[in-house]
């Protein structure tokens, strides 16, 4: 049995706490110093923030934790002391993070997530690798093994290969598909918009004007005068260069995030390791997966690839609250779908899924709603010219019909003895699956229009139902079918033991 002696953070912790606080306030500092505000209250607020950041370094002296037989106990705080006891069996995910400085000093930041959600249950910043191994042993019940002995035993027994690895080409595809370059570009322009007139803003604007002049001159000398086609070629070339630039940013972001990505499965746990500069390792027990979602956008289909994400009970909602691992399989060939999904959730019959479509009456309802919505942009055009309004209305109605037909075609649900699934989407298609043992509530909802057509919507909630995620919310089904499915789910769920 492990001793429950008092443990402290690593002696290098103040360095990382200081760097973490600097990272949080560096952007507000730049805005205050270079922005258009200039109010002395901003500088006072920044001074207070700097003082608080420096004082937070002292907290590492007061941070203590104990690895007790059944729980980890954490005590922190200088003026306001906070003590938490987290049972090992409540810990959903154990995530590790190492930037280059962590690796140089041989330390790591540990994040523990429980089913309470919102934010990490505990962040231990920072400890050495020996403490991490001991913590893993207490949480997962792993038996410590000498690394040399473990390596040799793996070779002798034929260790199973990784479930998924990402080559350089796959990471490039991921960058193109996700197109995170738009986010980076939005952050850059957001920062530039906050700059006041001065040397930095004038320098940036002058560089942008110089680049525009250089591009325009190069275009004229290379293409020449094409008459009326000049503007068309110019816009087309700018569009292509813009897309290439965005994809370059996206691919760079993906390389930093997913470098040497590896997904392993061991003793009922999934462990993903990734990262170029900052290495991240996240462990998720498969039994604690609440929902599994397969994403399939237009670019996914172009490259014949899929993305799988999971939700656990509670968990961290966004990256500002800590490490996140939602995309358990960021990108993999569509041909490997059945194999990979079976490895992640082996208790679901992936080969025998039978989809049931929603009601065909939904087509008429959706067309009516979209047609009424089409009148909003058309009415202002009527005052300009009736022909523009009529032509726009015809085009919008046609698009509404095509969208409604595609929506009804691609929206369906499935139900068997172990899980319920729901798929939807036209351009961005998603499929979400929930095991019956993870269901918490089943609701049948009727809107005013649903009651008119005798329809309803069936909603299934789990402990991992995050805002903005794709959930099992089956619309446009007949009321009697919704009630029948609800009764069947309640009956089957009641006969199964709920598992966190």
Image: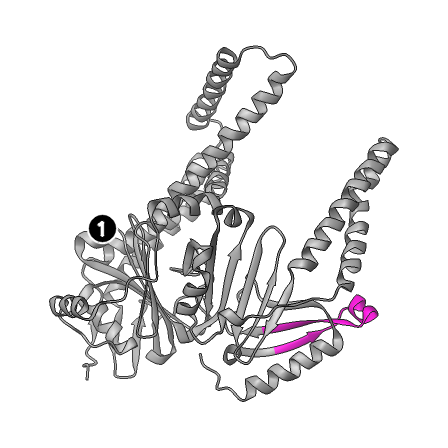
Q: Residue at x 48, y 74 (%)?
A: 348
Looking at the image, is 180 positioned above or below residue 147? above
Residue 453 can be seen in this image: yes
* The furthest residue to the bottom: 495
Residue at horizontal 27 percent and vertical 52 percent from the top: 99
On-image quarter of the C terminus: bottom left
Q: How many marks?
A: 1
From which residue to which does the magenta span run? 442-460
Q: Looking at this view, is 325 or 229 the one in front?
A: 229
Residue 114 % position (x, y): 40, 73
Q: Write down the residue under mark 1.
A: 101
Horizontal arrangement in the rendering, residue 453 relative to residue 59 (left or right): right
**Residue 49 screen position, x and y as percent:** 38, 51
Coloring scheme of the render? one colour
Residue 468 visible in the shown view: no
Residue shown at 18%/60% (left/top)? Answer: 11
* Label 1 residue SS: helix
């Amino acid at each position: 049995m492990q001793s429950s002696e008092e443990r402290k953070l690593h002696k290098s912790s103040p360095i990382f706490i200081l760097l973490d606080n600097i990272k949080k306030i560096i952007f507000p500092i730049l805005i205050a110093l270079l922005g258009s505000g200039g109010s002395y209250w901003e500088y006072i607020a920044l001074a207070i923030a700097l003082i608080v950041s420096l004082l937070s370094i002292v907290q590492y002296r007061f941070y203590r934790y104990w690895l007790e037989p059944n729980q980890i106990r954490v005590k922190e705080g200088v003026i306001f002391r906070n003590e938490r006891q987290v049972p090992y069996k409540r810990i959903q995910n154990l995530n590790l993070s190492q930037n280059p400085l962590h690796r140089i000093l041989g330390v790591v930041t540990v994040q523990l997530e429980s089913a309470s959600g919102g934010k990490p249950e505990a962040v231990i910043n920072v400890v050495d690798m020996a403490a991490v191994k001991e913590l893993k042993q207490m949480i997962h019940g792993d038996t410590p093994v000498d690394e040399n002995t473990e390596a040799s035993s793996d070779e002798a027994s034929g260790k199973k290969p990784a479930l998924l690895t990402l080559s350089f080409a796959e990471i490039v595809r991921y960058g193109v598909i996700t197109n995170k370059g738009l986010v980076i570009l939005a952050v850059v322009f957001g920062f530039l918009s906050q700059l006041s007139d001065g040397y930095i803003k004038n320098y940036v604007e002058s560089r942008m004007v110089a680049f525009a002049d250089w591009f325009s001159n190069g275009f004229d000398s290379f293409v020449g005068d094409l008459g009326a086609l000049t503007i068309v070629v110019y816009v087309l070339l700018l569009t292509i260069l813009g897309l290439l630039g965005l994809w370059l940013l996206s691919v760079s972001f993906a390389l930093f995030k997913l470098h040497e990505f590896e997904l392993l499965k061991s003793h009922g746990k999934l462990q993903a390791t990734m990262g170029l500069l900052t290495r991240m390792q996240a462990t998720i027990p498969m039994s604690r997966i609440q929902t599994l979602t397969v994403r399939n956008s237009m670019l996914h289909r172009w490259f014949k690839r899929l993305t799988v994400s999971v939700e656990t009970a509670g968990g961290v909602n966004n990256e500002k609250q800590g490490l996140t691992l939602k995309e358990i399989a960021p990108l993999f060939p569509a041909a490997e779908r059945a194999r990979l999904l079976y490895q992640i959730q082996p208790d679901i019959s992936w080969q025998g899924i039978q989809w049931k479509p929603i009601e065909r009456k939904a087509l008429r309802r959706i067309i009516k709603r979209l047609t009424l919505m089409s009148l909003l942009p058309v009415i202002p055009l009527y005052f300009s010219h009736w022909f523009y309004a009529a032509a726009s209305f015809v085009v919008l109605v046609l698009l509404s019909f095509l969208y409604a037909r595609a929506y009804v075609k691609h929206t369906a649900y499935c139900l068997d003895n172990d899980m319920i699934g729901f798929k939807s989407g036209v351009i961005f298609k998603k499929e979400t699956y929930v095991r019956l043992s993870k269901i918490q509530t089943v609701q049948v909802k009727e809107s005013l229009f649903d009651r008119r057509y005798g329809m309803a919507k069936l909603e299934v909630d789990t402990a991992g139902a995050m805002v903005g995620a794709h959930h099992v919310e089956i619309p446009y089904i007949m009321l009697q079918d919704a009630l029948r499915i609800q009764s069947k789910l309640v009956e089957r769920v009641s006969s199964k033991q709920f598992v966190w």
